[in-house]
Image: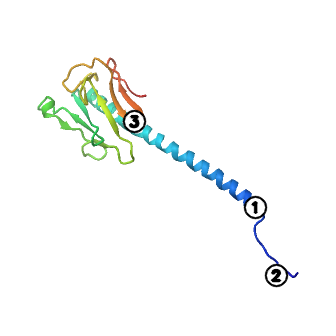
Amino acid sequence: MDARSRVTGFTLTELALTLVVIGILSGVAVTSLSGLAAARQDVAATRVRNALVYAQEWALGSHNNTWVAFEAASDRVTLYVEDPSNPGKANRLALDDPLTRSPMTLQLGSDGVGIESASFGGTVEVQFDPSGSPRDADGSLLVADGTVGVTGGRTVRVTRQTGLVTVD
């Protein structure tokens, strides 16, 4: 038999090795994708926590009340600040993002992770007074910790006594 008529192909060993490598790569891909959902949930909870901390720090620094309102139906978080020339919740203004100079609003939900619930003394917004203490939307001190539920079982908690904001 001459070299030109010789049949070439893959050996059984080469095919088996290729299948093993494909199997390993598939397992790694599935593991990475399942971790992606948890990472998205962590990021959303951290963004909500950061918004709460920012509003609290603004209240402390400006000596004005601030509010964070949660809209679970639209997965939106909006920050407000008291108008120093016209005090009171009815006259509050949107708190501007220091980088964009536009109203500070977080829009969650585009990646499937959003707000499931919010509860601050039976209301869906929290007020921080000039000392940083958390209050419900009516201005009463919280009698229980305030919580924001984020998709995937993450909870952002505002401790009623100290105002400490954590992610559980």
Question: Residue 133: percent from the left, percent from the top?
Answer: 28, 21
The three-letter amino acid code for the residue at tag 3 is Ala
Q: Which is nearer the N-term, disc 3 or disc 2?
A: 2
In which quadrant will I find the C terminus?
top left
In the image, 88: left or right of 113? left
**Dot 2: element:** helix
Circle 3 residue: 45
Q: Are marks 3 and 2 in contact (CB under 8 Å)?
A: no
Q: Are marks 2 and 1 in contact (CB under 8 Å)?
A: no
The one of 47 and 34 positioned closer to us in this rendering: 34
Q: Residue at x 73, y 61 (%)?
A: 15
Q: Report crowding for label 2: few under 14, some 14 to 19, many 20 or more residues within 10 A (C-alpha).
A: few
Q: Nearer the viewer, mark 1 or mark 3?
A: 1
Question: Residue 2: percent from the left, percent from the top?
Answer: 87, 82
Circle 1 residue: 14
**Dot 3: element:** helix
The three-letter amino acid code for the residue at tag 1 is Glu
The one of 14 and 88 positioned closer to us in this rendering: 14
Residue 116 occupies quadrant: top left
Residue 115 has which mark? none
Q: Does residue 70 lie above or below 145 as drawn? A: below
Q: Nearer the viewer, mark 3 or mark 2?
A: 2
Q: Report crowding for label 1: few under 14, some 14 to 19, many 20 or more residues within 10 A (C-alpha).
A: few
Q: Which is nearer the N-term, disc 2 or disc 1?
A: 2
Q: Residue furthest right?
A: 1
Q: Residue at x 38, y 42 (%)?
A: 113
Q: Which is nearer the N-term, disc 1 or disc 3?
A: 1
The three-letter amino acid code for the residue at tag 2 is Ser
Circle 2 residue: 5
Question: Residue 151: percent from the left, percent from the top?
Answer: 39, 37
